[in-house]
Amino acid sequence: MDELDRDPPAPPVGADAVAELVTIEQFLQDRRPEGASGDLTALLYDLALAGKLISNRTRRAGLTELMGASGVINPQGEEQKALDLYADDVVTSLLRRGGRVCAIVSEERPEPTIVDGTGTYVVVHDPLDGSSNIDSNVSIGTIFGIYPRLSDPDGPPDDGDWLRPGRDLVAAGYVLYGTSTVLVLSTGDGVHAFTLDPEVGEFVLTWADMHHPDTPAYYSFNHASSPLWDQGIGDFVAWLERPDTPQLSQRYIGSAVADFHRNLLHGGIYGYPAETGLPDGKLRMVYEGAPLAFLAEQAGGLGSDGHQPLLDVVPTTIHQRTPVFLGHRGLVERLQDMVDAAPGP
Ligand code: AHG
Ligand code: MN
Ligand code: MN
């Protein structure tokens, strides 16, 4: 047969898949509102880069000195792990150099970090969530939220820039270091997830427009603390466990970000209530509660402190704690109803 009569060569395996690949860069460019400066997009790239660096270190933690305690106590009185400090350093350094932020609030720093210049955003973050799980090889994550600056860019930023309701967030997300590394984010038009392809070092779109499943599968509370809960929370969990109710499975990882992610994919509710001795629960409003509640609402769910949407709460201090309930809207609303109906303590 003549050379020219042959069928064209088959495309290399996977070429179609490559053509359909959407990187995080492409996705954000395509969805950038007309006239936007591009600063928010660039800020999100910086956070994605931080996620890659932390992911890389996380994968090596067992081989290096990074698993152990650092010997330093954080503003919450908890001992910091070496990886907490590394993650905090990476996020802070990357954001500082970009010139787009005026202040950074971190779980690991007692005060906001003020960045010189005229940056127009504030980033709040929990650099390493679930750090007690590091040495047992269980999923951990980085949580972030982004606020537009309110103060005059010609002067210093002030409390009003970060002590504000989560409703003011323009973006929030997390990077989950699990069996794969996944970046989940929202800029207020739905929730989208990107999985890190470690071979090429790119976050690739894997779920667009995520929505809390209508039929929940899991509830995630630390059941060992149930004797310490208020009656309304106990009533709600007892209701979940009754044979005539949805019959959810109980799953609890102890990394809020990983529990949240699983329930976002498979449906359910995550909760960290107040306890005797922990009147405001354990999680922090500014860099855990608000960003996760923003994502929950964007995915059709709800984040609550047990009485009201977390996004409506105005914090008075950066490390303030709050009870947190996140996930399936109907379940979170039911929990609120049962809390409100229960007799006071
Ligand atoms: P962090 O590691 O940032 O301090 O957060 C840990 C939090 C949260 O991620 C998790 O759900 C909770 O602590 C687990 O606490 P318990 O071990 O008390 O259940
Ligand atoms: Mn945390
Ligand atoms: Mn943390």
Image (cartoon, rainbow, N blue to C red):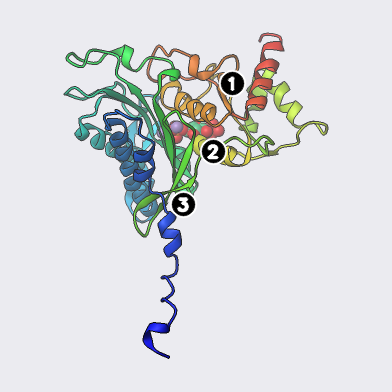
Q: Residue furthest top?
A: 344
Residue behind mark 1 = 275
The numbered mark at residue 76 is none
Task: Determine whether, in the image, residue 330 is placed left or right of residue 292.
Answer: right
Element on which disc 2 rests = loop
Residue behind mark 2 = 210
**Comes first in the chain, label 1 or label 3:** 3
Question: Mark 1: which amino acid?
Answer: Glu
Categorize mark 3 by other alpha carbons within 10 Å: few (<14), some (14-19), many (20+).
Answer: few
Task: Determine whether, in the image, residue 76 is placed left or right of residue 155.
Answer: right
CB under 8 Å between discs 1 and 2: no
Q: Is residue 295 above or below residue 49?
A: above
Residue depicted at 60% across the width and 14% down the height = 307
Residue behind mark 3 = 180
Residue depicted at 59% across the width and 21% down the height = 275
Disc 3 versus disc 2: nearer the observer: 2
Residue depicted at 51% across the width and 34% down the height = 256
**Comes first in the chain, label 1 or label 2:** 2
Image quarter for residue 6?
Answer: bottom left
* Nearer-the-camera pick, 207 or 216: 207
Disc 1 versus disc 3: nearer the observer: 3
Give the percent coordinates (x, y) of residue 67. 38, 47
- The quarter of the rendered structure image containing the C terminus is top right
